[in-house]
Image (cartoon, rainbow, N blue to C red):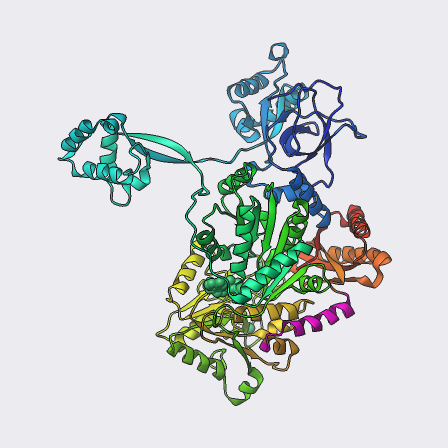
Amino acid sequence: MALDIDKKQHNAFADLILPLPIPKLLTYGVPPAASPMLGSRVIVPLGTRKIVTGVVAHMHNHPPNYPTKDILEILDTTPILSATQLAFFTWMADYYLCTLGEVLKAALPAGLRLSSQSRLQLSPTADLTRIVCSDAEQQVIELLQKHASLSYTALAKAIDRKHIPGVMKRLLAQKVVLLFEEVQEKYKPKKELRIRLAPPFVADMSQRQGLFHQLERSPKQLDILLKYISLTAQAPTLAVPKKELLGTTGSTAALRSLLKQGVFLEEEVIVPRISPVQTTPLPTDTLSAAQQTALDALYQAFKTHDTVLLHGVTGSGKTALYVRLIQDTLKQGGQVIYLLPEIGLATQMVSRLTKVLGHQLAVYHAKYASNERVEIWHSLLAGTCSLVVGVRAALLLPFHNLQLIIVDEEHAPSYKQTDTAPRYHARDAALMLAKHHKARVLLGSATPSLEVYYYAQIGKYGLVKLTERFGKAALPVVHLANLAAEHHKKPLYGEFTTRLLEAMRAALSRQEQVIVFQNRRGYAAYVLCIDCHWVPRCTQCAISLTYHQSARRLVCHYCGYRMCVPPECPVCGARRLKNVGFGTEKLEETLQQCFPDKYVKRMDADTTRHKQGYAQLLTALEQGHVDMLVGTQMITKGLDFARVALVGVLDIDRLLYFPDFRAHERCFQLVTQVGGRAGRREKQGQVIIQTQHPQHPVLDAIVHHDYEQMYRRELTERATFWYPPYVRLIKVTLQHVDQAVVTAGAQELAHQLRSRWEERVLGPQAPCVARVKSRYRMDIWVKIPKQATSDRVGAKKWLQEVTYRLLRQQAYRQLSVIFDVDPA
Ligand code: ADP
Ligand code: ZN
Ligand code: ZN
């Protein structure tokens, strides 16, 4: 629907979100005949040559203080974004200091995205009869008459390249040709071939008899006919999927021949990717007395609070309570989001949920194929989907009647987006989204984050506890194995203390499963020349390379750079290179040597890179085909297996002394979670932690399953040294290829920020890895006092302004900046 672009009289304006890195919305005129709706996509001119797509964020009648251009076309007759979404996205952009365009980019599946490939088309208003043009220009016009539109590159191929700039310039100036950003409707519906019996054979039994007779001598064709009849026994006119009809044994040639004879008809239909099947749900589990009490307490707490924390120990059966709340909400016609920190966890959870809910359930993941994401988007717009299980991006979907958000494993660091803007925390964003919908939020964890527990303590959130495990299971017994003491006695076998080895041997002999936790993948931490102490490092990052045995390569965990292990030291020429430290790969090897007749498996980013890798491991574990599992933090969450009796935790000291104000909290969470995999059924499980520091108070809290002890200690520290929940942290990172420039810029910025926040500005300091992908980095931390919201907004605005003013200076033009609000 092209609109008249020459009218200059306006009384309607639209503010648009454009796919550009600009902080402001741009205002366009709305032609009289048009009435775009909030949340619809439109096409507009930008500058003199470009045409881009945008989304309508506001409609009003206040002309801006610049001359406006008109909207050219409206792409959607019904909005693709709701008003609530727009409000939520605006909050997100403001709070996390990014642009609305960036939020939109994260939210929209590629199939709906505002794309940016330049294309040319003839102007619908140009009068071609009145134009005098050169041969080359005529050629371009003819090409464009033939094709509705062409990409710039396609055009350049078609006519002599050197003429293009001049030709285009003239045609554009005369408004004969328009240049626009292509809106690619990349979404493609899924189609399926179906086969149905031709009508005569359906209606007339004697015809069908004749058919059988006729096919007697072609057994393969007869097979297909019989299969068809058995598949359609219930509904004789049904078309069956071709794939299903052929199965693994059916003959394609035989079917082709049947189609040719007119026995069967073939048709193509559009089928949904997200299955709308409603299965009959299994009866829900009967709750234990403790669970029932907790459920009652949850309903009670929701009467006075919109947000409630469920603090339930590992294995207490929090999922059973989630299911009750979900069922309740669905029954009332409300929509539910079930958030998980990682999509890998969804596999187990989705099958658990589908069994009891029997309800349409959509799984949402940003990395899913765009087509599936588009279908979920549309089915939510159409109101045919009521439960979404997904990772953080699920919050950005178009809900219209959201009533409940469950944030499972609320404490998980992966809820924070770190790599690209918007750098949002899904738990916090969920709270805000719920506010927009007047929905409730249930935060669940065995090891709540300090901030959340604090808010529950001061009464901002409701708090419900579940302190016992479900069934006869007891919490595991936790022991510390003193590495320092053992080193004196005798050398370790591999990295294992005698205590842990003995316990493993005993568990395996009882046919029980063992989990070994080591939070580092790869084989060796790094490689070292014994003679000159040379260590291979990444060429682009300030970090040593990790040795991966299976790939026989040294790998950079920051940028993926890989190199072969040199046969000799490039510095001194010696051939004595040594592996230092150990990762999961090495442990897997050691354990296999130690227990040659047992199945040892590894779960880390390397073995689960492919979707199937993870699923296969889970199945193997479930069916008991794994005796020992070695893994990184991936194994800490959600795994629920019957025969795990022993968990070994290695290299804990590295976590304890990690330079981060959350190190102790994280350590407690990780170890408690991984230990929580042990003894989830009748037998009591055991956890053995190897450490050099058995006196450490955090380890003491872990041994005694004493969350409160860790909480109180850490909270005091946070108060003393000004950390969340007492202040709001913002990390500003500057980057540049030149170290001197980034250092000078960061110092200048820190200096200016101190004029307002004084000692609440930390740094600048180089992060742990000071150079990544050839760019040096400097961090500045700002601790903003928690006061009235208005002041906080003011503080952030000021921070942004000061930073951008600095970046406008000649010397710092090339610096790039990242704001990370509430860094994880
Ligand atoms: P959490 O998430 O709290 O660690 P889960 O929800 O995974 O615990 O539950 C632990 C185990 O107990 C699971 O195997 C689960 O199937 C079982 N379980 C929990 N509640 C019930 C119940 N009411 N009836 C039967 N089994 C239950
Ligand atoms: Zn050397
Ligand atoms: Zn690197």
In the image, 814 versus 412, the foreground residue is 412
| Residue 629 counted in the magenta span | no
Tell me which image quadrant ligand 3 sits in.
Answer: bottom right
Left or right of 106: which side holds 762?
Answer: right
Write down the region rendered in magenta: 703-722
- Classify the position of the C terminus by image quarter: bottom right
Q: Residue at x 57, y 16 (%)?
A: 138
Q: Main secondary structure of the magenta part?
A: helix
Tell me if I can see residue 423 in this picture: no
Name the quadrant containing residue 265. top left
Tell me if I can see residue 144 in this picture: yes
Residue 176: percent from left, percent from top: 63, 18
In the image, 618 versus 596, the foreground residue is 618
- Classify the position of the N terminus by image quarter: top right
Name the quadrant containing residue 778. bottom right
Q: Residue at x 63, y 29 (%)?
A: 42
Residue 477: percent from left, percent from top: 53, 78
Left or right of 18: which side holds 580?
Answer: left
Residue 343: percent from left, percent from top: 52, 54
| Residue 716 counted in the magenta span | yes
Judged from this view, the residue extending furthest toward the top is: 129
Q: Is residue 115 above or below residue 409?
A: above
Left or right of 764: which side holds 640?
Answer: left
Residue 332: percent from left, percent from top: 56, 45
In the image, 313 versus 652, the foreground residue is 313
Q: Is residue 15 above or below residue 495?
A: above
